[in-house]
Image (cartoon, rainbow, N blue to C red):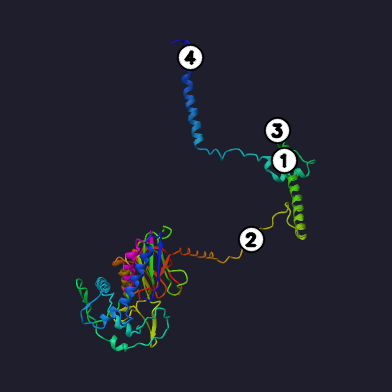
Amino acid sequence: MASTVRIQIVDPTSDAQMRVQAAEGVFRDVEATCTRFDPSSALMQVNSALKSRHVVSPLLFNAFSAAHEAYVRTAGRFDPRVLDDLVRAGYDHSFEFAKPGDEVVATAPAESWWSRSRRREWKPKFDKAASSVSIGNRAIDLGGIGKGLAVRWAMESLASAGTAVLLEAGGDIATTGRGPDGHGWRVAVENPWNVEGDPAVVLDASDAAVATSSIRLRTWTVNGTAQHHLIDARTGRPAQSGLQSVSVVASDTAWAEVWSKAAFIEGKAGIRTFADEQRLAVTWIDDNGNVGISRRAQDKVVWKVSRVQQ
Amino acid sequence: MTRGSKARWSAALVLAPAAAALFAGTSAWAATHNPLATSAPVAKPATTDAAALTTNAANPAGATPIATDPATQAQIDAQRALVQKLQKKVAKAAAAGGQTVQAWTQSVSNGSTQTQSAPQPAPQPAPQPAPQPVVKPAPQPVPAPAPAPTTQASTGASGG
């Protein structure tokens, strides 16, 4: 996941340290199981034999199940079958802190791949009793949900470690309680062009989760063409959404991450309608720096600006 | 009928027709005559003859009484006194006006401000101030947004 994990516990219990260690173990397990940058990971073992039936660990089984549920609920906007698209777009190795303008050479002819026909509906086969799975004929990338799942599962250990807990992993945040001062956990939505400056929005994320899909990081160029990691499965290409970032407040980080990506792919023109129809608490920043919030997010916003400086 | 009443009735019989005849005659005369046309000429009051008054005032010693009636003469004397009084007022007013003009001229030549006694010159049209350009009020400075509250975490680069 290449992310820093931070845990904040208010009035920790006597077993808080043990719970923290359990949470750290969750992150290690998810990283080892779900990374696509290690060919020996369980995920990549499944991806290497797509048409086979695989007996997998409960963690990976649950990850596949969660990914499929997200695919169904977002009507395909969230689609984990984008690994090949990412590789052909140049995202074939981890570069968490790549800067805009970094030149990355694609490993396969992109045009031939992107010109392929529309993909079919994803119909994986799950056998919970046997903990086996058949994922279909396209490789899976769990990058769009794996970190959220890690935070979800880690919070199962941390939730009762104190009167209030905050767990943050690379911008995916989950909290319990009312924060360190009893006034709630407040989360800043960064200005994509100036992360060190004032935020665009401050959200009340008490007893909630927040995640953001953004192209601030993981943006690069291939043969002079800008690329990013948020693939629109309908086209197989980086989404041309007119958005810089989308943040979602939900009850769970995995769902916050899934919906943020789906809303990002929906694009600037449709994000407000999409968020309101899905009853999502969403804030977004478009390419011009305008800050928007959905109807559901209005009571979550503690502070905001209408536009951020680029 | 007594003897006295018989006499009164006889007198009445004689006087009544006579009275009726007199009334009829005078009424007929009045109907055919214009009272204004036949009124006697009205004598002009002496006080309305300004020329005569002036002449008499210029030479009061040699004035010849216009009327010999004592009452009329008394009226004439009273009017003369009134005329003399008015003439003095006119002369006094004329003398005062000349001094005022002189004083006003003096003040102008000295370049001083006008005295209170000087007549106000024809009111000069007050210089109209140049029309002031319409100046819109300076826009109020946009109040600085409230500083962002303290946060415990930030999000913005996840989703990878």
Furthest toward the top, the residue is: B2
Give how far across and how far down residue A152 sits, in percent.
32, 67
Q: Amino acid at mark 3?
A: Ala
For disc 3, the chain is: B
Of label 1 and label 2, which has the lower sequence position?
1
Name the residue that disc number 3 marks.
B71
Indicate whether residue B139 is drawn in magenta. no
Residue labelled with disc 2: B126
Residue B160 image point, x, y percent:
35, 76
> Along the horizontal axis of the image, is B1 left or right of A53?
right
What SS does tag 1 mark?
A: helix
Q: CA distance from mark 1 to mark 4?
A: 66 Å
Secondary structure at numbered mark 2: loop
Find the magenta span and give its range: A146-164
Q: Which residue is mark 1?
A: B82
Whether A198 is drawn above or below A238: the answer is above
